[in-house]
Image (cartoon, helix red, strand yellow):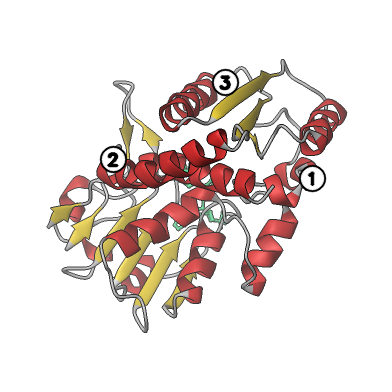
Amino acid sequence: MRLIDGRAIAAAIAQDVTAAVTGLTAAGVTPTLAVLLPTADEASAWYVRSIERVAGKVGIRCQVDQLENPSRETIIERLDALSADPGVHGIICQTPLPPGVRLDDVSAHIDAGKDVDGSNSVSLGRLAAGLPTYPPATAAAVLEILHHEQVPLVGARAVVVGRSTVVGKPAALLLLDQHATVTVCHSRTGRLADVCAEADVLVAAVGHAHLIGQQHIKPGAVVIDVGTNPTPDGGLTGDVGPYAAGHAGLVTPVPGGVGPVTTMLLMRHTARAAASG
Ligand code: NAP
């Protein structure tokens, strides 16, 4: 078993992003990412600080709008204003949202050309139709890691556990686009271990610590662990159990796997959005 180094993959992407940003800045365009933070949730604030840090490293300006328990209308107003602002190239609406406010509703107010985390239904529809778009960064990170590791996908059996619109579904669409034979599992899937054990590529995106055991993994399979589950000591652990991971051929660690690649892809998407005007 070999651990995939997500931080090293992110560092390699950072070089290209920095070069693109340097070119844009020299041409008078400062790539700018706006993050709407409609919550005081500490985990979200931590994630947004890490976005700011990574943006700073590659030369992208990051502006954070923190709103205290905003209404749906306030969020929409803010997203409309950012969408109309020519100085803003990428927009993220961070979750969790206040009770009763839905991401699929408010994200319709993120201009599709600035939807760098692929959260509005136009972006998702374009992804499903195989048209150019910004896929959700986490789903894109799954594919970026597989490509970086030169994992063969054409005709491969891929199983994605989780069907959320931010991770599971778009990851499945991206794998399908690469000609993998894709199965999507969820909470009602029967005989989950048997289905997973057929996978050459297994993507775990559930949010249930160590749900994936040794019996879920075909020996030598490539396992991408998207799960980030808090541990009692304040750390993070994945959806894949530590002993199970030993059964895989290649596996992403948590932390240090999908997370750093996801954040860097947000930067790549923002630089591309800035380049396309
Ligand atoms: P989510 O919206 O809660 O979706 C979880 C999915 O897992 C659902 O489709 C659910 O099925 C399925 N599921 C739940 N229990 C299951 C079980 N026992 N067996 C099989 N499937 C089961 O979560 P999410 O937003 O997709 O996030 C998933 C994980 O990825 C979380 O740990 C999250 O923190 C992490 N994440 C990481 C990153 C990163 O950059 N590393 C980014 C985003 C998310 P149903 O649809 O049937 O309910």
Task: Place residue 73 in its image quadrant.
Answer: top right
Q: Residues within 10 Å of mark 2 (few under 14, many from 20)?
A: some
* Relative depth, front residue between 24 and 212: 24
The x and y percentages for residue 127 are: 62, 65
Disc 2 and disc 1: Cα gap in Å? 33 Å
To which residue does mark 1 refer?
Answer: 105
Left or right for 30, reference 264? right
The mark nearer the N terminus, 3 or 2, is 2
Q: Which amino acid lies under the numbered mark 2 shown in the image of this protein? A: Arg
* Relative depth, front residue between 195 and 227: 227
* Relative depth, front residue between 97 and 2: 2
Q: Residue at x 48, y 22 (%)?
A: 49
Nearer the viewer's eye, disc 2 or disc 1? Answer: 2
Label 3 secondary element: loop
Can residue 172 be seen in this snapshot? yes
The mark nearer the N terminus, 3 or 1, is 3
Q: Which amino acid lies under the numbered mark 3 shown in the image of this protein? A: Asp
Q: Residue furthest bottom?
A: 155
Q: Which mark is residue 7?
A: 2
Ligand 1 lies under 8 Å from the Cβ of mark 3:
no
Left or right for 75, reference 57? right
230 is higher (above) or lower (below) than 8: above
The mark nearer the N terminus, 2 or 1, is 2
Q: Residues within 10 Å of mark 3 (few under 14, many from 20)?
A: few
Nearer the viewer's eye, disc 3 or disc 2? Answer: 2
To which residue does mark 3 refer?
Answer: 41
Q: Which amino acid lies under the numbered mark 1 shown in the image of this protein? A: Asp
139 is higher (above) or lower (below) than 217: above
